[in-house]
């Protein structure tokens, strides 16, 4: 399934055909994780001198999370891929259970493997290094030791780090330190490549999820959109509000003050916001608010802009905020919401809002200005539109005639698949969508078929692409087959072998996706010729 | 990219002929669906991009960006197309 070139990129260990068969037989050991590992393979890593040495060298230099075995004869080859963490677990569990009788040499070897797989080894390898990272346009540098010190702290010390009043660690702000830690771990694939203690792992995960310290806003919204249609900005209201902003307010309070003042101006002023003019009201409110954000140098991104709804994401310090301006029936505008995942940050925001509202606003604190009721995800910008109806109407108005060659369609298809370097179902389903969108009904029928299949030999779900420059129906002998195995991309298959595997059921099509693959009927598809 | 396209529609509406304007108004509505290009055919998408004034040399790369996997992943939950 993977090309020889690709396998060789991973420095595979060469084994005989006989050994390959042994490593594939059914004498397996069940790991505590439920995975099954071939016993002979695990045994040999510890007992075969050459293999052991090769494996240690691999652990020393490779950043692959898997170890590859290969057997070759002429141009034919077969391979086995084993996760390095499974090897570690398998060896340790088999030794503990007495399934591999070991003497002092092998215990020493196992200790060496265990050390190579440990975070301590990574820390030793990188001792003395400085880690530099840009955070919000300034450079932060910390020593690598401080990262491991924090992860390995005893519980009391760690809680002290989280809770005490100290605002810095390792020479930078505490939050910046955690941001560097999270990104350093990701960059070096520490979770994938090394065996981490439960406590260390739980700390890393909590940091990554912004549960302990909020680092979500760092490096976000470093640039800003600029409000279009300046003509809609109400300058007299804007200047009146800006003139009265109290000097003592901090950045967030200042933005909330403006929001509340605008809210009050627009929500209950019938001259500005009557039923007949509510769309203009939303627009004017939104544009004026965005314009003031520009004035305050608060960066924002316009997520959606329609006649009745205006959504922007903006950032004030650690707060990631969403303004989702809509007109409600009771003549008020909603709303503003803190989008941070960290609960403390969202609580802090609500407190700040209440306090500013209490000091300067005339509206009832309890009024739902903080838009908790509307569950709007920041990244989902979907607006309710009937796309099919709009496209139909569009096509009735003599749009430009565009001719797209089959070659262009296939070129885009292959480009997009090659760059779809993600695992699993997302990428497989993405190709379904490409097939439906890029090709006409006739082309789907004659030039490009796609099946989601279960490959019984590799025990994986993958995609099978069948391409034909003329017609699959009339010239099936010209079919070209590709196996799509995300995240590793496309692999051209021998047509005879692919057909045989489909016929024998080694490639078993997963039927439930067939309807999606077939797409529209000829009648539904006005491009059918 | 959607923001840029929306800006292009707005820029063109003012100076367009009556027929063009009718199409541009529809395009404007289509663009309100953030991942519209993941849910329409390539032929329709190319017509729309041509209407917006995207040149023949740039149209392929613009379209490829609009149908990129990252947009698809964002769109997954809302899509009625798959699964």
Image (tube, coloured by chain):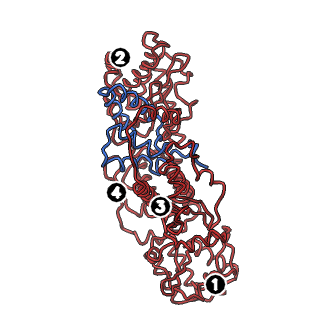
Q: Which residue is mark 3?
A: A470
Which of the marked residues, 3 or 2, is nearer the chain's N terminus?
Answer: 2
Q: Is residue A10 visible?
A: yes
Q: Which residue is mark 4?
A: A141
**Residue A471 in the image, given as x and y percentages of width and height:** 51, 60
Q: Which residue is mark 2?
A: A237
Q: Name which residue lies at 41% across and 72% down.
A: A125
Q: CA distance from mark 1 to mark 3?
A: 50 Å
Which of the marked residues, 3 or 4, is nearer the chain's N terminus?
Answer: 4
> Which one is closest to the eye, mark 3 or mark 2?
3
Q: Is residue A151 left or right of residue A237?
A: right
Which of the marked residues, 4 or 1, is nearer the chain's N terminus?
Answer: 1
**Residue A395 in the image, given as x and y percentages of width and height:** 45, 35
Q: Which residue is mark 1?
A: A40
> Which one is closest to the eye, mark 3 or mark 4?
3
The disc numbered 2 marks a residue on which chain?
A: A
Q: CA distance from mark 2 to mark 4?
A: 45 Å
The disc numbered 3 marks a residue on which chain?
A: A
């Amino acid at each position: 399934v993977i090309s020889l070139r690709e396998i060789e990129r991973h420095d595979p260990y060469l084994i005989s055909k006989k050994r390959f068969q042994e490593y594939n037989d059914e004498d397996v050991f069940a790991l505590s994780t439920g995975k099954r590992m071939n016993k002979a393979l695990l045994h040999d890593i510890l007992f075969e001198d050459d293999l052991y040495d090769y494996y240690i060298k691999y652990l020393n230099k490779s950043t692959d999370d898997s170890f590859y075995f290969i057997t070759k004869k002429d141009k034919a080859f077969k391979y086995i891929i084993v996760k390095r963490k499974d090897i570690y677990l398998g060896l340790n569990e088999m030794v503990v259970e007495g399934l591999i009788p070991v003497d002092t040499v092998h215990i020493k070897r196992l200790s060496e493997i265990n050390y190579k797989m440990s975070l301590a080894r990574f820390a030793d390898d990188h001792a003395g290094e400085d880690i530099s990272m840009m955070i919000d346009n300034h450079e932060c540098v910390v020593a690598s030791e401080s990262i491991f010190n924090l992860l390995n702290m005893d519980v009391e010390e760690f809680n002290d780090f989280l809770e005490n009043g100290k605002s810095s660690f390792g020479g930078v702000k505490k939050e910046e330190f955690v941001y560097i830690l999270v990104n350093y771990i990701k960059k070096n694939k520490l979770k994938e490549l090394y065996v981490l203690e439960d406590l260390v792992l739980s700390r890393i995960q909590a940091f990554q999820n912004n549960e302990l310290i909020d680092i979500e806003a760092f490096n976000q919204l470093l640039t800003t959109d600029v409000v279009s249609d300046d003509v809609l900005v109400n300058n007299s209201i804007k200047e009146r509000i800006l003139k009265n902003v109290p000097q003592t307010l901090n950045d967030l309070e200042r933005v909330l003050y403006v929001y509340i003042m605008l809210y009050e101006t627009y929500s209950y002023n019938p001259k500005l916001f009557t039923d007949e003019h509510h769309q203009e009201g939303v627009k004017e409110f939104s544009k004026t608010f965005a314009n003031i954000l520009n004035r305050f140098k608060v960066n924002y991104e316009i997520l959606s802009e329609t006649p009745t709804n205006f959504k922007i994401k903006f950032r004030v310090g650690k707060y990631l905020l969403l303004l989702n301006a809509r007109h409600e029936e009771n003549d008020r505008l909603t709303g503003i919401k803190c989008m941070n995942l960290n609960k403390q940050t969202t609580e802090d925001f609500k407190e700040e809002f209440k306090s500013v509202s209490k000091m300067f606003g005339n509206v009832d604190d309890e009024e739902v200005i903080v838009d908790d009721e509307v569950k709007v995800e920041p990244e989902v910008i979907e607006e309710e539109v009937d796309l099919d109806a709009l496209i139909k109407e569009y096509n009735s108005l003599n749009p430009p005639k565009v001719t797209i060659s089959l070659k262009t369609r296939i070129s885009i298809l292959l480009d997009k698949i090659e760059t779809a370097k993600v695992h699993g179902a997302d990428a497989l389903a993405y190709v379904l969508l490409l097939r439906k969108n890029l090709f006409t009904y006739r082309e789907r029928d004659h030039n490009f078929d796609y099946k989601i299949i279960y490959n019984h030999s590799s025990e994986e779900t993958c995609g099978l692409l069948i391409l034909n420059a003329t017609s699959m129906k009339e010239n099936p002998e010209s079919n070209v087959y590709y196996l799509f195995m995300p995240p590793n991309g496309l692999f051209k298959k021998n047509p005879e072998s692919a057909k045989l595997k489909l016929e024998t059921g080694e490639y078993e099509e997963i039927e439930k996706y067939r309807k999606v693959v077939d797409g529209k009927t000829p009648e539904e598809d006005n491009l059918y010729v | 990219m959607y923001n840029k396209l929306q800006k292009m529609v707005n820029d063109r509406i003012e100076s367009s002929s009556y027929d063009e304007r009718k199409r541009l108004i529809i395009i404007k509505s289509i663009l309100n669906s953030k991942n519209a290009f993941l849910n329409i055919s390539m032929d329709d998408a190319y017509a729309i991009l041509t209407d917006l004034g995207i040149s023949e040399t740039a149209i392929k790369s613009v379209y490829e960006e609009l149908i990129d996997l990252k947009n698809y992943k964002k769109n997954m939950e809302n899509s009625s197309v798959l699964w």
